[in-house]
Amino acid sequence: MKKSTKHDNGTVSVIIVEDHPLMRKGIREIIESEKDITVCAEADSANRAIALMVKMEPDIAIVDLSLNGQAGGIDLIKAMTDRGFRTKAIVLTMHGETLYVERAIRAGARGYIAKSEAPQIIIGAIREVMKGGLCVSNTISGNIIDRLLNEKEESRQSIEGLTGRELEIFELIGNGYKFVDIAKNLKLSINTVETHRKNIRGKLGLASSGDLMRNAIEWVHSHHK
């Protein structure tokens, strides 16, 4: 028996990795409006997604960056790449594109779409990626080039040392979230958020919580231009 979920008639199989049930339902409806694309599985965490990919080998994974559990979407995509999965990842997220798209592509994603885009963009991205292409909008590409030209190399390398979850927390701090709100937003314990905060400070060489907050605010502001 073949493990792959790709049908003999050429139907493309998709796993939706998203932590909100209503969003998963909406994505499923968009995808299954196409006769040659089908949703074979859904997951709300990286661990569940990996288990399903090992079992079903879907062609495409539609991945949100914020997921339940310790690992975020970028961590999942990196794990898929490291393990040599045949499944190609397309990011579908509410996160500001210039914050995460470069990191997602470096981790192995083949597409990056904002949730504010029209539904048919998702279908177009699936088809483009299945042909071997990379689906990133011109607007996003322009923002990346702009940022790279204006960002200091030292700062860029420091930020790239953060894990996907640490980057999420760093962004939330920069957006003014308190620890209790960060824990609630990411479905983590206060102790876990505190551990991540200490790790972020260490990696960025910041002496105090005040330094962390100032750096986070400045970084978020510069990436939302």
Image: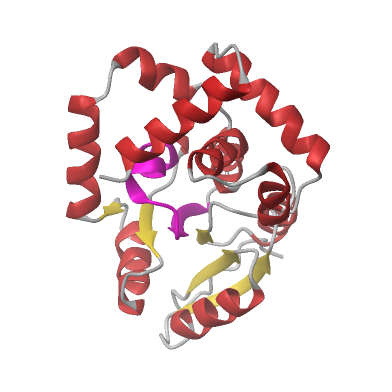
Quick check: can you spot residue 140? yes
Q: Quadrant of residue 198?
A: top right
Residue at left offset 54%, top offset 11%: 205
* Relative to 218, residue 73 above or below: below
Q: Is residue 203 left or right of residue 108?
A: right
Question: Is residue 83 visible in this depiction of the protein?
Answer: no
Residue visible at 38% across and 18% down in the picture: 155
Magenta residue check for 101: yes
Callout count = 0
Q: Is residue 96 left or right of residue 79?
A: left
Is 179 magenta? The answer is no
Residue drawn at 67 percent across, 61 percent down: 3
Of 11 and 147, which appears nearest the observer? Answer: 147
Rendered-image quadrant of the N terminus = bottom right
Q: Position of residue 57 (x, y in %)?
A: 62, 58
**Outermost residue toward the front?**
210
Q: 35 or 223: nearer the eye?
A: 223
Highlighted range, magenta: 87-106
- Residue drawn at x 44%, y 42% as measured from the top left: 104
Residue 149 point in image, percent of width and height = 18, 26
Q: Is residue 107 left or right of residue 102?
A: right
Q: Position of residue 30 (x, y in %)?
A: 44, 82
Q: Is residue 182 above or below residue 63?
A: above
Q: Image quadrant for the C terminus?
A: top left
Q: Is residue 135 above or below residue 103?
A: below
Q: Position of residue 134 (x, y in %)?
A: 30, 50
